[in-house]
Amino acid sequence: MTLRELRYLVTLADVGHFGRAAEACHVSQPTLSMQIRKLEESLGVALFERTNRTLHVTPVGEQIVAKARWVLSEADSIVTLARRRTAPLTGPLDLGVIPTLGPYLLPWLLPPLERAFPDLGLVVHEDLTDRLFERLRTHRIDAALLALPIDDGELNTLPLFDEPFFLALPPGHRLAGTGATVSQSDLRREHLLLLSEGHCFRDQALAVCGFETPPERNRGTDVRAASLETIRRMVAAGMGCTLLPAMALAGAGEHALEVCPLDVEACRRIGLVWRQSYPRAIDVEYLAGTIRDNLPPSVRTV
């Protein structure tokens, strides 16, 4: 068994197709197929269930793939330890980011990060919080930008900034243009548009309004929006109001939105999260410093 065979195994399990896996591994399909077959023979188990049209990982294959990910991560950490002697933030780095943050923070962050660390091989994975947790635990990403706090004894967290919330309204709304702040009682009388379940920002918005679950009047239109951009356009169309984080307000005028401040301190704290066993903690600190140095003025560094 070799590291190369384990990389072929993990790649094939991820993409589910011999041709695409071979392309990703920069080898021919016959070579990859032969190496997988060789690995199965050496282990004495079938790792994949093959048909003419489909390819599925077997139950024992799932367990072996999980172990292979860990082995490859540890092998990569050996290379990382050597690279750290030369320069920070060099080589591959897989970074997770939640969908309500990525479109607004990444344009501020990526250009200066590339200029400061040209040898960094950054790969950004945008996904929901629970799935990013799973990717962290299975060594599929190295760190993630998430809303804090995080209650997990195996993960480290580093707070970066606080992002205030604002109420977004359609033009002509009774609360728009008054110059007054919006209270929780005002919010509870409004038709609140929310992201679908699984988005941490949905739960934060409900908490700001004092709801544990959406009120009955919000359940009539079951939109289940997957992005803040969808919500913004629905508000502009007069279908309700919503809470938006400060960075998502850029270009609000282009979407014909009115924005009102809240009369309570409502915000989310964003931080970096990584495994305690991750060997490149110093790189996380360099990344955190670059983020703090390149934040938009609408958020507050912590």
Image (cartoon, helix red, strand yellow):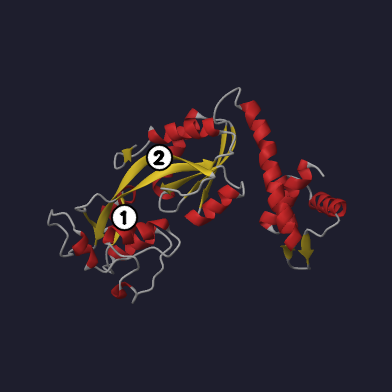
Instruction: Name the residue at 32% across, 66% down.
Output: 193
Q: Which residue is mark 2?
A: 159
Left or right of 298 on screen, residue 290: right
Q: Secondary structure at mark 2?
A: strand
Left or right of 226 on screen, residue 281: right
| Place of residue 47 in the rendered image (x, y in percent of width and height, measured from the top left) | 78, 58
Regarding residue 178, the answer to whether it shows in the image is yes
Asked if labels 2 and 1 touch by Cβ distance under 8 angstroms, the answer is no
| Place of residue 139 in the rendered image (x, y in percent of width and height, measured from the top left) | 61, 46
Query: Of all residues shown, which one is farthest toward the top?
Result: 86
Specify few, some or many for label 1: CA neighbours under 10 Å numbering under 14, 14-19, or 20 or more.
many
Residue 177's quadrant in the figure?
A: bottom left
Q: Which residue is mark 1?
A: 244
Instruction: Name the residue at 50% across, 48% down.
Output: 152
Query: Of all residues shown, which one is farthest toward the front?
Result: 153
Left or right of 135 on screen, residue 69: right
Q: Amino acid at mark 1?
A: Leu
Work out whether residue 18 or residue 194 is closer to the camera in this orientation and state it.
Answer: 194
**Disc assigned to residue 90:** none
| Place of residue 134 in the rendered image (x, y in percent of width and height, measured from the top left) | 56, 53
